[in-house]
Image (cartoon, rainbow, N blue to C red):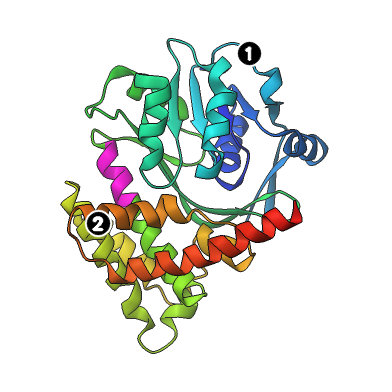
């Protein structure tokens, strides 16, 4: 199965890198600057002091031709429009597209452009890029779940599950991938709002008086929105999210928090704005998520202004 991984950042670089290291037929679609860096340094995944060096097969958008069997979208939402244009030559009648993006809005955007080729996907991994462009892995958690938007387990989903299995991360096929995507949305909005509002890691928040109550309170709001949308949180998912949001000495912080402290634009609307808008339409009160969204919108205007000024 020919696989095209769009983006070689913290998420795409990890999952695509592990697949390439396991001998799968993987090509990374990257920007010219990232291609140059990877050709010089190779793709590196760093975990517990050890580096895994992967000689990645690379292609830039003008070089892309011919269909792939599977396209994995490991990008941020801000890059989605450009990515859809870039991958068009790679999409054939048998191609499946699996996005790793946060939130839910991207699913309808992709489906409008590429139709039933678009599957649902959920990945869970704690990674980030360092200054050298290496993928830093912070915890053992690494899983990927694939499913059909219409539900059930059609044959192509099982074929993809089998292709991705055995590459150093957990793989599953879900008969309710839309529900699984909502449940991840609850997780990332809980961790994101907690760390961004308090400007600290989960461990730092939990260490102060009252800090251990904030994450569960935010989770309750996000869970209520998910339930009102028809996707109540299973007890297992609730327990996992609560434990991650209250873990003492935890270095866990969201990608939005890392963007905020670095002064970069963050995925505010995709993770938070869309969620609180759906909460309003479903008459679900979300005061803490509203506060986090407002705070992050202030940051976003400042960060985008700095980017424009620098340009």
Q: Given contact means CB atoms under 8 Å apart, are the residues at marks 2 and 1 in contact?
A: no
Q: Position of residue 223 (x, y in %)?
A: 24, 59
Quadrant assignment, res 3 = top right
Q: Nearer the viewer, residue 170 or 118?
A: 118
Where residue 260 appears, as percent x and y from the top left, is 57, 65
Q: Is residue 225 above or below residue 18?
A: below
- Residue at the spot x=31%, y=68% of the render? 218
Q: Which residues are magenta?
A: 177-184
Residue at left 78%, top 40%?
37
Left or right of residue 93: residue 58: right
- Residue at the far right in the pictured view: 40
Indicate which disc residue 89 carries.
Answer: none
Binning the other alpha carbons within 10 Å of mark 2 as few (below 14), some (14 to 19) or many (20 upward) gives: many
Provide residue 131's location: percent of width, then percent of height.
74, 56
Where's residue 21, x and y in %?
62, 33
Tell me if 293 is positioned left or right of 310 in this view: left
Mark 2–mark 1 Cα distance, whole angstroms, equals 42 Å
Above or below for 182 versus 23: below
First in sequence, mark 2 or 1: give its number. Answer: 1
Residue at 16% from the left image edge and 52% from the top image edge? 228
Quadrant for residue 151, please give it: top left
Tag 1 residue: 65
Q: Residue at x 37, y 27 (%)?
A: 111
Q: Indicate the quadrant where residue 275 lies.
A: bottom left
Q: Which element carries disc 2, helix, strand or loop? A: helix
The kind of secondary structure element at disc 1 is: loop
| Residue holding disc 2 | 279
């Amino acid at each position: 199965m020919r696989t095209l991984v769009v983006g070689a950042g913290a998420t795409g670089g990890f999952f695509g890198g592990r697949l390439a290291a396991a001998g799968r037929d993987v090509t990374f679609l990257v920007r010219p600057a990232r291609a140059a860096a990877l050709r010089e340094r190779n793709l590196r995944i760093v975990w517990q002091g050890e580096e895994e060096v992967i000689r990645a097969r690379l292609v830039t958008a003008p070089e892309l031709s011919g269909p792939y069997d599977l396209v994995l979208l490991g990008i941020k939402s801000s890059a989605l429009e450009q990515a859809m244009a870039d991958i068009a030559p790679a999409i054939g009648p048998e191609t499946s597209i699996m996005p790793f993006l946060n939130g839910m809005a991207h699913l309808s955007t992709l489906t409008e452009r590429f139709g039933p080729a678009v599957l649902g996907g959920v990945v869970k991994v704690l990674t980030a890029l360092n200054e050298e462009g290496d993928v830093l892995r912070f915890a053992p958690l690494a899983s990927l779940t694939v499913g059909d938007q219409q539900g059930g387990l059609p044959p192509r989903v099982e074929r993809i599950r089998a292709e991705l299995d055995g590459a150093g991360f957990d793989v599953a096929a879900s008969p309710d991938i839309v529900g699984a995507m909502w449940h991840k949305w609850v997780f990332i909005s809980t961790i994101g709002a907690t760390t961004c509002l308090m400007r600290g890691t989960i461990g730092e928040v939990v260490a102060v008086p009252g800090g251990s109550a904030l994450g569960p309170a935010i989770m309750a709001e996000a869970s209520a929105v998910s339930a009102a949308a028809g996707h109540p949180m299973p007890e297992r998912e609730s327990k996992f999210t609560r434990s991650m949001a209250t873990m003492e000495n935890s270095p866990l912080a969201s990608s939005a928090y890392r963007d905020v402290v670095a002064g970069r634009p963050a995925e505010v609307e995709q993770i938070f704005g869309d969620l609180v808008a759906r909460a309003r339409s479903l008459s679900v009160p979300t005061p803490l998520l509203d506060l986090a969204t407002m705070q992050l919108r202030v940051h976003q205007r400042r960060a985008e202004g700095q980017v424009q000024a620098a340009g």
